[in-house]
């Protein structure tokens, strides 16, 4: 039996890794978060990952989950960090599933490793997204020839 592959993304770590996103985030944070969610939804659609993205809360209810296109979107509780929520998710799921945590925060990466998760930096996720998009285009091209 294969274990589910779960990708947990530190949303703000990803945004602030990308200069174009981080500049726009200062003007319109909600729009940039929605763009990140759309990109991660496309990644999930093109791969076998179940994607979870976690953002710092800014006053939303704790662990307010939604399924935009099938991915799970969480916001940490006001006064708490996304890091703490990511660590709880890694602790809960890493023993039962193949969990990968995406963050550029070295302490969070170390903590995720202690729970049995693998980690990747945001720049590696960008490369994964590009590869998944190319693979999807190739599959679509093959299907259109039929």
Image: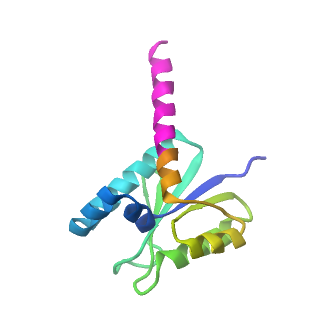
Q: Quadrant of residue 75?
A: bottom left
Q: Nearer the viewer, residue 86 or 19?
A: 19
Question: In the orientation shown, which residue stands out farthest toward the left?
Answer: 27
Q: Which residues are magenta?
A: 129-146
Image vertical order of residue 113 relative to residue 122, above or below: below
Question: Does the magenta stretch mainly form a helix, a strand or a loop?
Answer: helix
Question: In the orientation shown, which residue stands out farthest toward the bottom?
Answer: 79
Q: Is residue 111 magenta?
A: no
Q: Position of residue 29 (x, y in %)?
A: 28, 66
Image vertical order of residue 88 relative to residue 139, above or below: below
Residue under the point 39% across and 55% down:
37
Q: Position of residue 85 (x, y in %)?
A: 53, 75
Q: Position of residue 96 (x, y in %)?
A: 73, 61
Does any portion of residue 69 appear in the rendered image? no
Question: In the orientation shown, which residue stands out farthest toward the right?
Answer: 1
Q: Quadrant of residue 111?
A: bottom right
């Amino acid at each position: 039996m294969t274990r589910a592959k779960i990708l947990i993304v530190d949303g703000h770590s990803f945004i602030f890794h990308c200069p174009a996103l981080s500049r726009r985030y200062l003007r319109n944070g909600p729009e940039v978060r929605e763009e990140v969610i759309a990109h991660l939804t496309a990644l999930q659609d093109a791969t076998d990952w179940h994607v979870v993205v976690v953002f710092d809360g800014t006053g939303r209810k704790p662990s307010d989950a939604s399924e935009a296109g099938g991915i799970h979107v969480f916001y940490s509780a006001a006064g708490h960090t996304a890091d703490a929520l990511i660590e709880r998710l890694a602790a809960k799921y890493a023993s039962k599933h193949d969990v990968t945590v995406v963050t550029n925060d070295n302490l969070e990466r170390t903590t995720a490793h202690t729970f049995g998760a693998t980690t990747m930096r945001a720049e590696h996720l960008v490369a994964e997204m590009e590869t998944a998009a190319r693979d999807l285009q190739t599959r679509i091209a093959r299907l259109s020839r039929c």
